[in-house]
Amino acid sequence: MKISDHTALLLIDVQKYFDDPGHGRRNNPDAEENMALLLKRWRMLNRPVIHIMHISNPSLPHHPGRDIKEIVAPLSDEKVITKNVNSAFIGTNLEQYLRESEIDTLVIVGLTTDHCVSTTTRMAKNLGFIPFIVSDATATFDRISFDGNLYKAEEIHQSALVSLSDEFATVIDTKSVLEW
């Protein structure tokens, strides 16, 4: 595999909001560093980069938690798409932008593995794109289930990746992508 002009790096919801300790324990503490390595490579090769921002209610005043983390902050010429649901394809021009740009392959990173990353990956595949999800450049948080049981972030992360693997995406790690 090689990183062609038709392969975009899609960074989903890498926002300061997720730094709030109220979210609880998280897996993959180095996920943002891995995202930054991939972003550096995409920029060096002058390949398409798309940043996705989740803004639940655009009419509310700006909150600093909405901002994309500095480690992967977009450059002025990089596409930034805002969304207000889990999928980056719903209510946005992402699909149109990808098709007009002749992008057929997506390397997907971001937060959180089991929510917006998973939902966007599934839709990408259903729309006919070729998604790769980077396992160590995504992360999630511990969660209390409907029955009161605690599920560890790593369990949730792995479960989400298992559900996506082969049927919806190729699961790969940062080192492997950097070797393309």
Image (cartoon, rainbow, N blue to C red):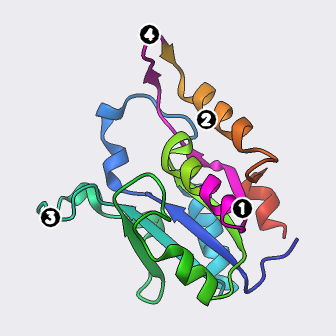
Q: Given this view, does label 2 or label 4 mark the residue nearer the observer? A: 4
Give me the C-alpha separation between circle 3 and circle 2.
Answer: 32 Å
Q: Residue at x 45, y 24 (%)?
A: 143
* Badge number at residue 147: 4
What amino acid is found at the position of numbered circle 3 in the picture? Answer: Ser
Towards the viewer: 21 or 60: 60
Residue of label 3: 59
Residue of label 2: 157
Residue reaching furthest to the right: 1
Give me the C-alpha separation between circle 1 and circle 3.
Answer: 32 Å
Q: Where in the figure is residue 164, as x and y percent of width and height?
A: 71, 44
Q: Residue at x 47, y 33 (%)?
A: 141
* Badge number at residue 86: none
Q: Earlier in the sequence, mark 1 or mark 4?
A: 1
Give me the C-alpha separation between circle 3 and circle 4.
Answer: 35 Å
Q: Where in the figure is residue 87, as x and y percent of width and height?
A: 48, 56
